[in-house]
Image: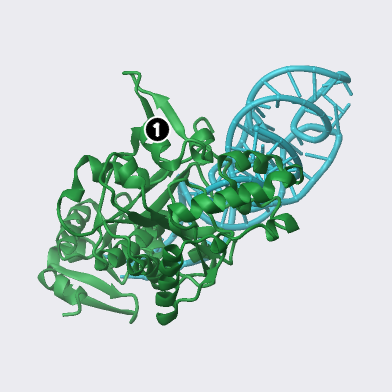
Amino acid sequence: MAYQKVKGTNDFYDLDSKKLRYIEGVVTNIIKDYGFSEMITPIFENTEVFVRSVGEASDIVTKEMYTFLDKGERSLTLRPEGTAAIVRCFVENKLFGTPGIKKYYYFGPMFRYERPQKGRFREFHQFGAEIYGDASPYLDAEVILSAYRILTELKIKGVKLKINTIGDFISRENYSKALKEYFKDKLDKLCDDCKNRYNKNPMRILDCKVDSDSDILKNAPKIKDFLTDEAKAYFNTILKCLDELKIPYVVDSSLVRGLDYYTDTVFEFISDFDGLAICAGGRYADLVKSFNGPDLPGIGYAFGVERVKDIMEEEGLFPNLERCVDVVIISLDDDSKISALNLAYNLRKEKLSVEMDYKNNSLKPQFKLSDRVNPRFIVIIGEAERESGIYTVKDTINKIEEKVKLDKIVSFIKGE
RNA sequence: GCGAACUUGGUGAAGUGGUUAACACUCCGGAUUGUGGCUCCGGCAUGCAAGGGUUCGAUCCCCUUAGUUCGCCCCA
C-alpha cells in the first residue's frame, strides 16, 4: 500500500502486456504492407511543438498537457498525441527532400491530464499513421482503407465509419462567416462553452454535446452548402472510392474534430460497444508549412490502443496468448537438479519451452508445478535415470510413459 | 474542472457502534505417497485506504485527503 502507480496510469503484465503487443504486431504488419515505415520520436518535445500544431486554444493545450521546466529552464511537454512530433521530425530532418510521398507510422505512449474513466487514461497508447506529400482523394481513400483493414484484421465488429469534409480554406472562411451570422442573435440560447466557441471557432459549436438536440443546431447552416466546387468534388471522389470498395460509412456533417490542424477530410471509427472513437483522423493541409517546412499536405489517423483492447476483450477476439510450456523436468535429488539444468539448457537451444523445479526433491510439489503450467511432456530424473542414462518421459496428451536415452530425448520430444 | 458510487488479508469476498473480523481459494508448515493433479493435521488481517473528529467505545457515524470505477466536458 506504500507506493502506487500514478493516477490514470496502468501496469501491463502477463496477459495484458501480451495483448498490447499482439495488437501492435497485427497493426504494424498491416501498415508495413501499405508501405509505411516506423518513426520513433522522443516521448517529450519542446512545448511549442504541440502548441503550434494542436492549437493554442484547444482543450489539449490549455488544460491537458503534462508540461514542465527542465533544469535548463526549457519548457517541455510529454507528448499528448503523435502527429506533432512526426511533423517536427519530418521537417527538421528535411525528409521532404527526396521525391515521392512519405509514409510513417508510430506506436507508443501518449499523455494527457484528464479525469480517468472508461477508455481514457492519463497515459495511454496510440498507434498512428501519417502520409505527407500529396493531396489526392485517392490517397484519402487509401488511408481510410488502411484503418478499415486494421479493424477487420483485428476482427472488430460493430464499428461505424463517420466521415465529413470541413472544406478547403475558402470553404471554411465562408462557412465560418455564415455560422457567426446565424448564431449572432441566438447566443443566449447556447451553453457557456458554445459562447466561447462562437469567437474562437464557431464550427466547434456543431460538435457540442449539450446543445446537440436543440433545433438551433439542427437548423444551423451546413458546411456542405458552403463548399467550393473543388472541395465538393474532392470529397465526392473519396465517397465514390468507398462506395466502389463497399466500405460502409455515414456522412456526418456535424463531425468537425477537436484538433485545430485538420482541414478537408475528417473521419472517425466509432464503436457501438461504448460509443467511443477507437480511431480518428483527417487531412491537414497546412501543418508542414506551419512548421516552416514546404507547402506539403498531410493526412493521418490514430488508434486508441487501450480502446481497441477493451473492445477485443469484450468481443473475445484475442487468440490464446498463454505461454505454452513444452517440457517440465522433475528431479528427485541434488545431483538430478544438475542433470535437469543441463537437459533444460539443451532443450531450450532447440526452441523448446522448459520449466523445472529448483527447490523440491520429492515428487508431489513438482507435479503440482507441472499441473500449473500444463506441459506437453514431463521428464523425470532420479538416481536410477542418472545412472542408466535412460530418462523417464511422460507424454501428457497420450498418457503414456516411456524410457528414453538421454541423447534421444530432443528428437523424441520434437516428435522424431 | 464538475458530479455519483465505491476502497475489508495474497485473491474473491461476508459482516457489525462493544470481548477471538465469517466463508472460500491461494499460500506456508507437517503427515503419507518413485508417479501427481488426493486425503488428513496445523498456520495465515492487533486490523477493515490514510489522517482527524463524534463516542465510554468505531472497520461500521461525520469531515478531510488519496485512490478506483462511472458519468459530464473533452478526447484515441
User: x, y percentage for residue A97?
Assistant: 16, 49
- Decide if residue A95 is on the left or right side of residue A279: left
Task: State how many labels appear.
Answer: 1
- Decide if residue A158 is on the left or right side of residue B60: left
Q: Nearer the viewer, residue A111 or A190?
A: A190
User: x, y percentage for residue A409?
Assistant: 16, 71
Q: Residue at x 53, y 37 (%)?
A: A7
Q: Nearer the viewer, residue A342 or A306?
A: A306
Residue A293 position by quadrant: top left
The amino acid sitting under disc 1 is Thr
User: x, y percentage for residue A241?
Assistant: 39, 76
> Can you see residue A167?
yes
> Which element type, helix, strand or loop, lies under badge 1?
strand
- Decide if residue A175 is on the left or right side of residue A48: right
Chain colored cyan: B
Q: Residues within 10 Å of mark 1 (few under 14, many from 20)?
A: many
> Can you see residue A12?
no
User: x, y percentage for residue A57?
Assistant: 51, 37
**Which chain is mark 1 on?**
A
Say which residue label 1 marks: A77
- Decide if residue B66 is on the left or right side of residue A394: right
The picture's colour for chain A is: green
Q: Nearer the viewer, residue A297 or A179?
A: A179
* Quadrant including the N terminus of chain A: top right
* Quadrant including the C terminus of chain A: bottom left
